[in-house]
Image (spheres, helix red, strand yellow):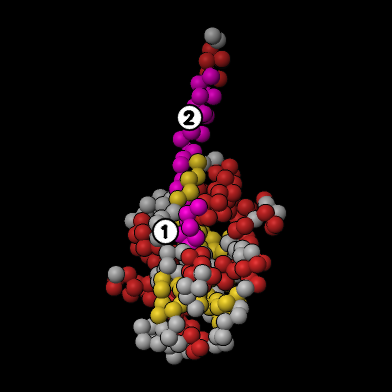
Amino acid sequence: MSRVLKLSLVWCLSCLSSAVLQARELSFAVEPFLTPRSLISAFQPMRDYVGAQTGNKVVLVTAKNYDDYLDRLFKGEFDLAIIGPHSALLAAQRAGYVPLLKAEGALHAVVLVRKDSPYQRLTDLKGQLVAFPDELTVTSMLGGELFKQAGLVQGRDITFRHNDYHNTAAMMLLRDEAAAAVVADSALLPMSPEIRAGIRVLAESKGVPQMVLLAHPSLSADERRGVAEAVAGFDQSRPPAHNFLALIGISMTRPLSDADIKQVTPYVEALKRHLELK
């Protein structure tokens, strides 16, 4: 073998080794706002796209419930994570996570009732049971504010039943196990026309920033930039009709602003108080 050929072979092997070392496995965690099967189905296309664009193996993960997800997030177990804005900011404080992008639009909590129900205002629900998502979610906090503003106190005037998932809260309403359900407004979008025809929105909360994409502090600036560009480019890679995440309002293209952080800060403090009590 000639000396030139040997040097070329060594150079090629060196480049291959460098590429292998640069590629890595990244855990991509998604807040358990839907059942695990629904989450995997919804986020698999984004996972595949981010993996292809960054050259990394991206593995989708979630948790059995919101408490477990937060615990693992605060321990720094996830390389990438999508979660509500108040929890994202607390993860940045406690575990050094770096906010990369936020979903477009605003998140609202909506109170749903059956279309043929007699309830016309929140006060009509006095004495009834209302299904909620996990109490630590910002949706649950916004929903709780609506009832508080209406003068209804949990445990005295009304009963809240918290669930692990948004769709579980909605199903309680559809199965007549609750008089009303609190969910994020984005949960209405993927509902079938038949289901939407049988429900109506009784009340809607103010809006807050949508879900946030976080990166573990161990990722380099170049890695964070590559992930952010891939996630932002995902929407353009798929027709809107075939992009379920865009349909439910998870279209991430821009970072959190100072105004976003200011708006979410009261819910960060509320989350801290909730966690201290648990």
| Residue 24 position in % (x across, y down) | 46, 40
> Residue, x 51% and y 55% (percent of image)?
39
Q: Is residue 151 above or below residue 236?
A: below
Q: Looking at the picture, which amino acid does disc 2 mark? A: Ser
Q: Is residue 121 above or below residue 134?
A: below
Q: Is residue 74 magenta?
A: no
Q: Is residue 14 magenta?
A: yes
Image check: 57 left or right of 273?
right
Q: Is residue 13 above or below residue 90?
A: above
| Quadrant of the frame with the C terminus | bottom left
Q: Quadrant of residue 156?
A: bottom left
Of pointers 1 and 2, the one earlier in the residue sequence: 2
Q: Looking at the picture, which amino acid does disc 1 mark? A: Tyr
Q: Which residue is mark 2?
A: 17
Question: Along the line of sight, which residue is nearer the eye, 24 or 40?
Answer: 40
Question: Along the line of sight, which residue is nearer the eye, 198 or 53?
Answer: 198
* Disc 1/disc 2 C-alpha distance (Å): 29 Å
Image check: 154 left or right of 38?
left
Which callout, 1 or 2, points to the residue nearer the camera? 1
Q: Which residue is mark 1?
A: 97
| Quadrant of the frame with the N terminus | top right
> Residue, x 41% and y 52% (percent of image)?
78
Residue range in magenta is 9-37
| Residue 200 position in % (x across, y down) | 61, 77
> Residue, x 55% and y 85% (percent of image)?
119
Classed neighbour count for the residue bearing mark 2: other residues with Cα under 10 Å, few (<14), some (14–19), many (≥20): few
| Residue 2 position in % (x across, y down) | 55, 10
Describe the element under mark 1 as helix, strand or loop. Answer: loop
Classed neighbour count for the residue bearing mark 1: other residues with Cα under 10 Å, few (<14), some (14–19), many (≥20): many
Residue 32 in sight: yes
Asked if the residue under mark 2 is in contact with the one under mark 1, i.e. CB atoms within 8 Å, the reply is no
Q: Quadrant of residue 12?
A: top right
